[in-house]
Image (spheres, rainbow, N blue to C red):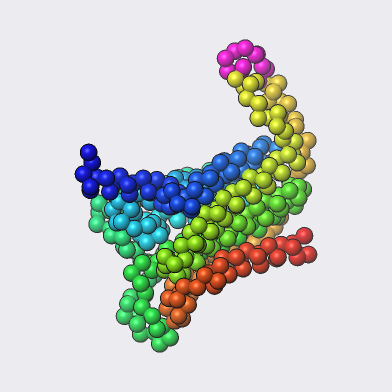
Amino acid sequence: MLVPEAATALEQVGTALSFTDQGNNLAGVFFQASLPSYLGFLYFLSYEKNRTPPLGQFGFQFLLLFVLATIPTGIISKVAYGTTLANVDWLHGSAELLLTVTNVLIVLGFRAASTGDEVGAQGELPRKVALGIAAVVALVCATGSSLGLEAHSPFLFGLGDLGPETVGSIPFISHAEPENALSLPTWAIHFSSVFEWLFAMQVVWRYAAVTGNERWKGLTYGMLPLHASGLAACTYHIFFNDGSLQFLVELQAFLTLLGNTTLAIAAFRIATSNGWAFADLNPLPAIQRAIGKEEADEGVAAEAAASELAELPALRTYEGESGLLLSVKLVALTTISAYLVKYGELAIDAPFSPNAILAALLVLAPPAYVAYSYQQPDNA
C-alpha cells in the first residue's frame, strides 16, 4: 500500500503527463487531440512536389520538441514546486524558448527560398544551432531544481528586469508585481514568438507567388488560430494567471487543436494541387521491396522522380526586407512590447481586476485584424 506522500507524488506526476501540464482536464484533452492533426500536417507539407523549403519543414518539425518539453517541465513544476508551469518562470521561459526557435527556423527557411538562397533554404547551420539550444534547455531543465532554482526564480536571471526600488520610483506605477509575474526575458520570449509567427505567416503568403501556387496562401490562413492560441497564453499571463480566467487555458488548447487541424487541411490542399493522391498512402510497394518480393530499379525510379520535379514551374524570387532589417525590427518590437506590458500594466487596474470580456477581446481582436489585412488588395 502506498504511503500518502508517495500516492500524492504519483498523482502529481499523472496530472503533469500531458501537454502544458494540464492533466486530464478539458485543456489537456484538446492539447493531446491536436497532435494527430499536426502529424498529418507535417506529412502533407513534406510532399516532395510542394517544394517546401527544407529549413522551413525542419522548423515545423522542431515544434514537436517544444511540445515534448512541456511534459518534463510540467512534471517538475508539479512535483518540485506544487504549481503549474505558467508559474515557474525559469522553466516556463526555457520551454518557450524552443517555440521561439521554431518560429525563427520557419521564417529563415521560407525567406531564403523566396530570395533564391538555396544554401539558406537548406539551413544546415541553423539546424545545428537549434539542436544545440534544445540540448542546453534539456540540461537546464534537468538540473535547475537541484541547483537551487526556485519556483519564481527568473528565466535568464531576470536579464533586463528593473529592480523593485526602480519600479517603485516610477510615478505612474500604482501596483506592485505579484510573485508569479513573468520576468522580462520570459515576456520577451513570448512576444518574440508572437511576432515571429506573424513574420512566418507573411513569408508563407509570399511563397504562393514564388511557387506560382495560390494554395500556399491557405496555409497562412491556417496559421491564424495558432496566432490566437499564442495570444491566449499571453493574455493569461497579463492577468497574472488568475484562476478566474481559467477559460483562457481551455481556449488556448482549443485554438491549438483548431489551428493544427486548419494547418493539416491547408497542407493537404497544397499537396493535392501538386499531384498527391490517396494511392500515395499505400505502403505495400515499399514493404514488398523491403522483403524482396518485388524487384525495382531504383535508378529508374529516381530518374522518373527527378523528371517529374523538373517539370514543375521554376521558382520565382522575392526581394523583401534584408535579414538585418528584419532582425532589428524583431528585437525592437520584442523589447518594447516586453517592457510596456511588464511595467505598463502596473499602472492600470485592469490586470488586477480580471474581466473575461476584455480577455477574450485581447485574444480574438488581433487575429481578426490580421485576417482582414490579408484580404486587402495590397496582399492579393
Q: Residue at x 50, y 62 (%)?
A: 248
Range drawn in magenta: 288-298
Q: Quarter of the image containing the N terminus? A: top left
* The quarter of the displayed image where residue 195 is located: bottom right
Can you say whether 258 is above or below 338 in the image? above
* The quarter of the displayed image where residue 370 is located: bottom right
Q: Residue at x 33, y 53 (%)?
A: 78
**In this orientation, does residue 380 appear?**
yes
Q: Residue at x 44, y 67 (%)?
A: 244
In the figure, is residue 358 to the left or right of 298? left
- Can you give x and y, in whole percent of width and height, for residue 196 in the image? 56, 59
In the figure, is residue 365 to the left or right of 146? right
**In this orientation, does residue 42 appear?**
no
- Can you give x and y, in whole percent of width and height, for residue 177 in the image? 37, 74
Q: Residue at x 65, y 53 (%)?
A: 222
Q: Nearer the viewer, residue 351 or 266?
A: 351
Can you say whether 139 is above or below 281 in the image? below
Can you say whether 182 is above or below 162 in the image? above
Q: How many discs mark residues in the rendered view?
A: 0
Residue 140 part of the magenta segment: no
Q: Quarter of the image containing the C terminus? A: bottom right
- Can you give x and y, in whole percent of width and height, for residue 318 in the image? 71, 55
